């Protein structure tokens, strides 16, 4: 038996196809982003390349779902890549060739899957691998996703249910999948979180031969499930889909404050992808279209600082090949990377008049981030002695500091411990 | 345009197959109950013979649903009777022969239908009559019934949606259907009431050539929708399925109290079927099995009195052909029938220590029902002057009355107006 | 025993001091409005002159409450008029002289009272009339009003509680009070509705020698309590305080739709005072100050039409002595008055694209009001045949009508029955 | 500025007067328990002696509150000890003599206080120390406790509010108070948690000259406030009052599971007092009376094990002077004490069929507690390799263990790390 938390000792970093390509990403697009990551971001810790939803749907063409679309499926009720979009999957190869390619770049391969079993499998009643059971036998017929028609839930009490989920993990493992983002599971507007299927996924991954990071979507996950999620997943979402508008970023501060006690090695509450750079190429979600991020530079700094200090996973959401240098610099910022990888016990230590102070520390360093969430610049008088004293940090010369912070911007202090 | 409320000027009465046959009733069983009704109950106002759920499923065999069962369906995505259970439906005749038979007895014919369009139609993508549309075009893909797998909801904003519902009413009308019980529509534990589909049903019935009583299930309907329901249906349920146990009967008093302001000609809040006599022959719902009703005679009197005074529809749920004479007498009770048909403005006028008094009146009569909901007999001193004075009724000799009421029993007073 | 509903056979009409004077109205102001009402509105059915909240507080000076203000109170824990504001109350006369004066004008007298017993009585522990009990004995210590510090609730299960409420009604009756508006009782943001104290008030009024209309505030009352309220009060509020802004008027349509089934003789769901004419003289509530109503003339017509058709009580909220002639005409409008007094079964019969149609009818007349709730003028094609047919009204020449309705305005049709 | 969490580096242990004396404890009773603690428990880490609620009420005589009782209060609106119950407080000495006495035993002194300012102060309008303000100026008039009449809340935005709370802490500090249990603050059935007053208490304690442990009651605190509570208090309650019945103990497992992520140095989610030994002497709460604990020995072991492993504060609730030796042994149990003081990261690691396994570890030791929450004995096969492997603990000889656990009992494993 493995200890799943050790698979993700630091918060995962990488690229995800959703924010730029919606449900429609192709193999070529995945590869070009992987290559760019290898060349420019790998040395900064970015390593996961994740193919998001609907890779099994030949007709997918944006972030809008096609109700009851025909899906590519194998004889065991498992969805497989659409060959028109992923040519290397031809001949039943599945994602193995793409996985191999990504591994050949020294990167890791991730995919998305919807909770449950295809409705198409149930209505055509295909079989479950290594059992005498069929899809009808294990489907939870009145458990659906509120926003996508691909699947029925699985009734984990039914014989064959665990075999089905095991067969999925075995297939993904054989493809070289290192990271699995399961959707419609951490929260559902109809049913709340699907804890039974989360527990079953955890069990089959633990019992498998594969080390696969488990990421749960969508949010908001419930604090009531926080302790449960710590025991069952590496990442879980704090919000519904996050996009490039200030209100969502503003709200994330309160979410992070509440979830901070749950951050620990191998458990990374997830603020969602970074909607930066070139977005919405084929993704019309979040009120968007083909664009550069709507965040100002101040807001982008604020976002990266919060995500990094809080130790959220960091998945770039834009197309990498035409990233601008300012954004690339931000992703490569050493201070943020260091804080993200080695900081511990992130915590909001004060919030007054929308001046928000977060703290994190490693064995050598204390970081303080002072955010100005106001719509106008603020003059802040910071009593560093008061702020730092509780953390047993003594630097007598630093009694107070005055600073001016632009609207929606942040200033980071870094103190070396003696 | 018709005025739908005039189709049911008094609360409908009849027989329904659910309480004794669950989802599995056959043509023979329907006919034997119809014949019995004609011979023994028609003259007392019972006239509707209603075939409940799953008459389109060949494999139905109890009240338990079969997930994803194969259903009989016509080319226009409409469910049709299973010929193995309803032989007269052979050759595409549908329920026309059975409807004709019931009409020939001087009775009226009712059927049950699930809200929406068959999932089977959607996944095989059959067409919608008189349109270029298909089932996929009009299905609301993530709108399901929480307890039955037959249908998807219909998206009333889609072209073809109204045509589909119109085609249903035209089919039912051509069969001679006088009464339509639509299910999964008045309440849903997942979504609340489906008001858009209720409104569309109302519209297509109003615009059709047919007079069809519209009954909505299941409950509990929400008081928030009370005014809406008055404008759209003849009956709607106050509870989830009602069975022969005291707690459910006890709770019905509070439900009736709250819904009494909504009772008016053509609008009959519905306390559900009468689980009396021989029940559960093939219906294992409500914790039951093949049995005589678990209600005591006191409780049966109490139920019939509340239902009648409140003007609930009255549908007998047991097998009629082996009804016992005590129960038959209760159904034929003249005082209750008179109160049920001619009473107006039913109202609970007091409740103290579980002695509950209801009142109803016609132009000639005032009825008072004094219920003892306690588990022990109660001695009640009734100040009739106080109770009746507000209703402008003067009968000086009747100052007070003392009475003893058995547990769960009722005493009815009937006063003629001067 | 009286039948309380017969005390208010039609919806009460009059004037209330709150919208112009807040908590601070004086005897002179009450009298000048009474005299104006006698001279200009009495013949149109306006008859109640109501002194709203805090008449027992000498320091009241606007609609803002003074926490823990000293109140005028008699030896039996009952609040009495502040003599500095109501000089005729001097010498313990209470409101008797003012009541007599209003009666001398042929009008009726109303006052406001807060649910419960003064906190001041409890903390100084004064006595309850005709009992050996004191205020501490009957107070419900942890039942308070969320927005006013005058009172504790009364624990109706305590000996002395009923005697206290009886002593209040006896005092008010001796003053000539015809109308009692009890506040903090129909809804409370902390506790919901206080049904036990409502029931006790009903009982002591019924058992008293006085005919007093009972009006309950604030709203929104709950539909769950609708049947209860019908049995216990003449009026109850549908909303929290209503002011002269369009959004509140817009929202009232949906409230009226839901409450329409509860309208019957003696039971008048209450849309609150009419914030018209000269408002906010000393009332700063609702974001207001000394002003003419912020409603446009269209909106005023819309409001009066909805209130009248729905049979809401009609209490003018502005200062009457400087009313303008347009507004006075509106209050004296014969069609509205007739609809308000003799209409029955008010009902919203359709709402589409914010064109809302209400209907009401008397034995001789059908009224249709077509409201345009849009922010722009609308061209409406009205199929009168379709609208009126259900109401058994035949007028062949009127097949359709086309009309143009200004934004927020209304057109009323009146049809004589044959 | 102090760092408040360092004041309670391990979970506080001691005695509290509530479970045996309710609101009525006397100085003599406090002293006899303190002496016993010094002699028998101090060396095991028990050090706090806490006087619970109503010590300022001369008439308190059980756990039942007296509505609007006269309280002892100083000129600055602060409650002071009732001299008839605490004779040493005579002459304005307050709790100083009792505090000194307890300190003289080498123990620490704690008291209870209700959130807010006395209603009695507000209605007699006494002053706030060192300000020109009075109680009326700072009271939040419509903020009350749902179950006790002593106080109004304090409006923290008002001038004088902070001065009042500071004056309380200064008074308590001058008395030698080491531990302050503030009630009606962590949760309120009317208002939820009172975060503003918690924040103000934190601030005035931090700014004072005193080290005072801050404990917040009652529960259940909300997980939504978990991160906030970590920054503001040393302890907060997980439940409403906890008593000696199995259902409450059973439910505590789920509460502890959810709160475990919040346990850290100085932050001790609180399972409430230990209702053991001789209880209910003058406390009739929780359905009790004068009795020995109703918990079986198995249940007591289970409770102490859960509380200790979870690192809850441990306050004995019974009268100590007649404790039996079995119970005393339990309090002195070395394994539990060691686990309680040096364990870290308590966590429920599995729960299946009501066999619940918790884990905790120090630098040297791993503890596993296997609880049987079933009502019958259970045979458990424990795969220790599977359970311990994730914790990097290698002990090959221990592959599996079989054990029999009595109903409601527990078995603890202790493994030394290599």
Image (cartoon, coloured by chain):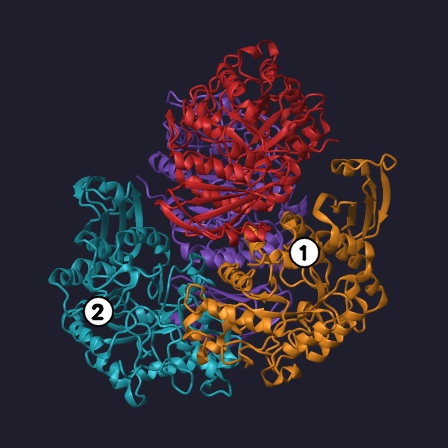
Chain colours: A red, B purple, C cyan, D orange
| C257, D197: nearer the viewer | D197
Give the SS element for disc 1: loop
Q: Is residue B31 visible?
A: no
In the image, taking residue D82 as reference, residue D323 lies left or right, namely right
| D122, B233: nearer the viewer | D122
User: Image quadrant for the C terminus of chain A?
Assistant: top right
Q: How dense is the environment of label 2, judged by Cα within 10 Å: few (below 14), some, or many (20 and up)?
A: many
In the displayed structure, would residue D308 be above or below residue D26?
A: above
User: Image quadrant for the N terminus of chain A?
Assistant: top right
Residue found at the far left of this picture: C325
Q: Which residue is mark 1?
A: D9
Q: How dense is the environment of label 1, judged by Cα within 10 Å: few (below 14), some, or many (20 and up)?
A: some
The x and y percentages for residue C273 are 27, 63
In the image, taking residue A56 as reference, residue A410 lies left or right, namely left
Q: Is residue C101 visible?
A: yes
Residue found at the far front of this picture: A397
In the displayed structure, would residue D18 be above or below residue A329?
A: below
Residue found at the far right of this picture: D397
- The disc placed on residue C46 is 2
Q: From mark 2 to mark 1, how far is it between C-alphas?
A: 73 Å
């Amino acid at each position: 038996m493995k200890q799943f938390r050790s698979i993700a000792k630091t918060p995962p970093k990488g690229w995800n196809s959703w924010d730029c390509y919606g449900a429609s990403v192709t193999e070529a697009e995945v590869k070009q982003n992987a290559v760019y990551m290898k060349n420019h971001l790998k040395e900064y810790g970015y390593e996961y390349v994740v193919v998001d939803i609907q890779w099994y749907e030949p007709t997918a063409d944006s972030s809008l779902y096609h109700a009851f679309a025909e899906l590519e499926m194998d004889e065991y009720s498992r969805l497989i890549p659409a060959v028109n979009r992923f040519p290397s999957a031809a001949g039943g190869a599945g994602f193995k060739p793409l996985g191999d390619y990504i591994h050949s770049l020294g990167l890791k391969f991730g995919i998305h899957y919807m909770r449950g079993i295809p409705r198409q499998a149930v209505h055509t009643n295909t079989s479950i691998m290594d059992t005498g059971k069929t899809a009808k036998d294990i489907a939870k017929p009145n458990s659906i996703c509120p926003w996508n028609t691909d699947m029925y839930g699985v009734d984990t009490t039914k014989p064959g249910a665990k075999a089905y989920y095991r067969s999925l993990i075995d297939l993904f493992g054989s493809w070289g999948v290192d990271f699995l983002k399961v959707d419609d599971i951490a929260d559902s507007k109809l049913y709340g979180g699907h804890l039974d299927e989360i527990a079953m996924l955890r069990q089959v991954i633990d019992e498998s031969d594969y080390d696969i990071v488990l990421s749960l979507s969508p949010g908001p996950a419930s604090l009531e499930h926080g302790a449960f999620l710590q025991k069952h997943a590496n990442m879980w979402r704090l919000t519904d889909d996050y996009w490039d508008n200030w209100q969502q970023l503003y709200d994330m501060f309160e979410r992070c404050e509440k979830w901070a006690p749950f951050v620990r090695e191998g458990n990374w509450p997830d603020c969602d992808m970074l909607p930066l750079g070139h977005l919405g190429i084929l993704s019309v979600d979040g009120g968007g279209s083909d664009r550069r991020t709507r965040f100002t530079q101040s807001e982008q700094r604020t976002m990266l600082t919060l995500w990094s200090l809080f130790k959220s996973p960091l998945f770039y959401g834009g197309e990498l090949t035409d990233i601008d240098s300012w954004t690339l610099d931000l992703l490569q910022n050493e201070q943020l990377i260091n804080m993200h990888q080695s900081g511990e016990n992130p915590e909001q230590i004060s919030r007054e008049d929308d001046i928000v102070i977060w703290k994190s520390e490693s064995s050598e360093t204390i970081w303080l981030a002072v955010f100005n969430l106001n719509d106008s610049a603020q003059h802040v008088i910071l009593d560093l002695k008061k702020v730092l004293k509780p953390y047993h940090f003594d630097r007598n010369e630093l009694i107070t500091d005055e600073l001016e912070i632009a609207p929606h911007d942040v200033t980071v202090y870094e103190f070396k411990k003696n």
